[in-house]
């Protein structure tokens, strides 16, 4: 149902021209793409930067809750949502 977008005749005409431009650009890329050129998802080579996991001191409950706008019984206190009652 989501793909059934209602378009006016003017919108169809406008989008048809844009679709033609997109298809033409894809055809140009297909002409230059050769088996010796690897496909990429980004024009610049990227790599993730990882750091080693290190065990550290966990925060105490008091440290965790010290800046909370509202806390009760050692937990963050938030307003009810979605019609739920407390």
Image (cartoon, grey):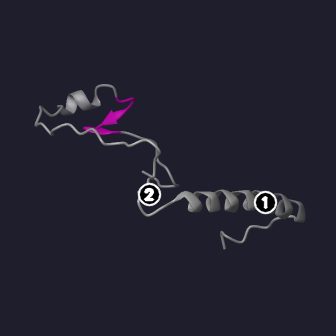
* Rendering quarter of residue 5: bottom right
Location of residue 27 in the rendering, given as x and y in whole percent from the top left corner? 63, 62
- Above or below residue 80? Residue 13 is below
Q: At numbered mark 1, what does the secondary structure look like: helix, strand or loop? A: helix
Q: Callout 1: few (<14), some (14-19), or many (20+) C-alpha neighbours within 10 Å?
A: few
Seen in the image, is 22 located left or right of residue 40? right
- Residue under the image location 62 percent in, 60 percent down: 26
* Rendering quarter of residue 76: top left
What range of the chain is rendered magenta?
68-76
Question: What's the distance in space between the residues labelled 2 and 1, CA to CA?
Answer: 28 Å
Seen in the image, is 54 located left or right of residue 4? left
- Residue under the image location 25 percent in, 31 percent down: 64
The residue carrying mark 1 is 15
Location of residue 14 in the rendering, given as x and y in whole percent from the top left corner? 83, 57
Q: At numbered mark 2, what does the secondary structure look like: helix, strand or loop? A: loop
* Rendering quarter of residue 73: top left
Question: In the rendered structure, does residue 6 fall within the stretch colored magenta?
Answer: no
Q: Nearer the viewer, mark 2 or mark 1?
A: 2
- Residue under the image location 41 percent in, 59 percent down: 36
Seen in the image, is 41 located left or right of residue 9? left
- Above or below residue 74? Residue 16 is below
Q: Callout 2: few (<14), some (14-19), or many (20+) C-alpha neighbours within 10 Å?
A: few
Seen in the image, is 46 located left or right of residue 8? left
The residue carrying mark 2 is 39
Disc marking residue 80: none
- Above or below residue 57? Residue 33 is below
Q: Decide which of 25, 74 is in the foreground and name it.
A: 25
Q: Decide which of 47, 67 is in the foreground and name it.
A: 47
């Amino acid at each position: 149902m989501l793909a059934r977008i209602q378009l006016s005749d003017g919108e169809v005409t406008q989008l048809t021209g844009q679709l033609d431009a997109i298809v033409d650009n894809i055809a140009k890329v297909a002409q230059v793409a050769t088996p010796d050129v690897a496909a990429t998802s980004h024009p610049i080579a990227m790599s993730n930067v990882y750091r080693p996991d290190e065990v550290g001191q966990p925060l105490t409950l008091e440290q965790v809750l010290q800046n909370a706008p509202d806390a009760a019984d050692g937990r963050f206190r938030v307003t009810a949502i979605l019609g739920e009652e407390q």
